């Protein structure tokens, strides 16, 4: 009996091994045209019957029929009108809707999925995705390389445009907005995941959640507009990305670098990043970034930095920016040093610079040639620079710097009186926050160009 059981188990194991081997072999052979080898990172997309979709799409012609009839590499110019989704593209195509074509998924699933390289989607409106975060319901999923997505309107979708393992592609002049949901449960307007060397230019991402780039390197974000969202752009483990010429208004955070190396932020306007976590530009264990020629205005915090620069012997360059009318111009939450701040303008901020710790920290970062609207000195030789260094000392301010709960009382009469008395007759040694050896005496007439 035991011998029979042993043979039965051996036979079952052999059958399972063959089934698994056949399944793996079959999956590997089904690589869509133009994709090349890539990992299958998507959860299975559910299939919805027509009666499960909103009635507005019941009488529409399926756009999938047009795609299925097209030869690989062909150009599709569909007749103007509305069509029913979803659409799955598994071959290189060019679809040009001339701004007169709408594809509607009827509030279920993802509207369009591109599983091929060398594909162009232009001049179409994608609308009506589902609202499942588990399956990343979106207007447009893009997979593959060398794709072009331009002049697309993506609205009434949970996620907007979702790129995973997409390289050397162009995302240009699209208008993206999310479903009308609470900010935290909207999908990302534009997401890059393991996607590098892409151009993201001239897009409008409005009333969405975030633009994010995770594990995605050397992408260029140029001349985009981001409004009324959470993060304008959030980089995580994403190196050497360029953010230039953008305008980000009324978002909780402008640009945030988390666990990154390299990167440039230049010629942008970041305004009205307010609220409890409001921040124009933020760093978390980031290194080697250049921040130059930006307007950072009307934010709760202009730049917030935590353990940055993080890598040994690295720096963060902050130069020729304007920090104006912010609650705090720059806030350092750690004492690592390594920041170089040159030729910036600080004006109208409630507090110019703060640190999250104690001690004389003025020598840890390098300050030179910055303009300070609260500088108390003269320029007797007329060279445009103050005769004396500009020092920022912390007196009673240290109370709310060390105790965040006390920030509520920062500008109260009691705190102002206490600060005045301590400056008049210090009963403790003030902390040196910064020392600018060569402060500008005259404010530069031009800073940011965006």
Image: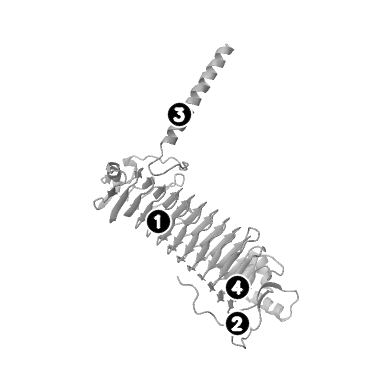
* Residue 420 percent across, percent down from the top left: 68, 79
Q: Residues within 10 Å of mark 3 (few under 14, many from 20)?
A: few
Label 4 neighbourhood size at 10 Å, few (<14), some (14-19), many (20+)?
some
Tell which circle, 3 or 4, labels the residue nearer the N-terminal end: 3
Nearest to N terminus: mark 2 or mark 1: 1
Where residue 171 is drawn, which disc sits there?
A: 1
- In the rendered image, the residue lying farthest to the bottom is 380
Tell me which label, 4 or 2, sits earlier in the chain: 4
What residue did someone put label 2 on? 385
Residue 309, quarter of the rendered image? bottom right
- Cα separation, mark 3 vs mark 4, equals 66 Å
Tell me: 42 left or right of 279.
left
Q: Secondary structure at mark 2?
A: loop
> What x and y, as percent, mark residue 173?
37, 60
User: Dot 4 corresponds to which residue?
Assistant: 351
Residue at point 58%, 83% (across, down): 384
Secondary structure under badge 3? helix
Q: Nearer the viewer, residue 153 or 390?
A: 390
Of pointers 2 and 3, the one earlier in the residue sequence? 3
Write the residue at 60% across / 73% down. 352
Mark 4–mark 2 Cα distance, whole angstroms, equals 22 Å
Callout 3–callout 4 Cβ contact below 8 Å: no
């Amino acid at each position: 009996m035991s011998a029979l059981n042993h043979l039965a188990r051996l036979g079952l194991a052999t059958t399972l091994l063959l089934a698994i081997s056949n399944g793996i072999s079959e999956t590997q052979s089904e690589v869509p045209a133009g994709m090349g080898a890539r990992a299958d990172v998507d959860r299975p997309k559910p299939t919805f019957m027509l009666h499960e979709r909103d009635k507005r799409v019941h009488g529409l012609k399926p756009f999938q029929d047009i795609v299925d009839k097209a030869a690989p590499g062909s150009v599709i110019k569909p007749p103007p009108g509305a069509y029913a989704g979803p659409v799955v593209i598994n071959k290189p195509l060019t679809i040009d809707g001339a701004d007169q074509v709408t594809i509607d998924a009827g509030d279920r699933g993802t509207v369009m999925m591109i599983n091929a390289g060398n594909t162009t989607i232009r001049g179409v409106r994608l609308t009506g995705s589902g609202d499942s975060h588990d399956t990343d319901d979106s207007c447009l999923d893009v997979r593959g390389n060398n794709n072009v997505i331009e002049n697309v309107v993506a609205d009434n979708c949970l996620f907007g445009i979702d790129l995973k393992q997409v390289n050397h592609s162009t995302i240009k002049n699209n208008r993206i907005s999310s479903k009308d949901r609470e900010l935290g449960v909207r999908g990302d307007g534009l997401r890059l995941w393991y996607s590098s060397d892409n151009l993201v230019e001239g897009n409008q991402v409005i009333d969405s959640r975030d633009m994010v780039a995770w594990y995605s390197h050397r992408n260029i974000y140029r001349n985009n507009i981001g409004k009324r969202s959470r993060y304008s752009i959030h980089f995580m483990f994403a190196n050497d990305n360029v953010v230039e010429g953008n305008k980000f208004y009324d978002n909780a955070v402008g640009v945030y670098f988390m666990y990154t190396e390299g990167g440039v932020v230049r010629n942008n306007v970041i305004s009205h990043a307010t609220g409890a976590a409001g921040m124009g530009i933020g760093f978390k264990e980031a290194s080697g970034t250049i921040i130059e020629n930006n307007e950072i205005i009307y934010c709760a915090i202009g730049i917030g930095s935590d353990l940055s620069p993080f890598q040994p012997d690295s720096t963060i360059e902050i130069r020729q920016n304007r920090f104006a009318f912010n609650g705090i111009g720059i806030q350092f939450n750690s004492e690592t040093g390594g920041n170089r701040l040159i030729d910036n303008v600080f004006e109208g901020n409630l507090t110019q610079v703060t640190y999250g710790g104690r001690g004389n920290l003025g020598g840890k970062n390098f300050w030179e040639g910055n303009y300070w609207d609260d500088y108390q000195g003269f320029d007797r030789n007329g060279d445009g620079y103050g005769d004396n260094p500009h020092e920022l000392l912390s007196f009673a301010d240290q109370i709310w710097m060390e105790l965040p709960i006390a920030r509520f009382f920062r500008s109260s009469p009691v705190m102002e009186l206490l600060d005045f008395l301590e400056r008049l007759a210090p009963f403790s040694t003030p902390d040196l926050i910064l020392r600018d050896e060569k402060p500008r005496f005259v404010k530069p007439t031009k800073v940011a160009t965006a």
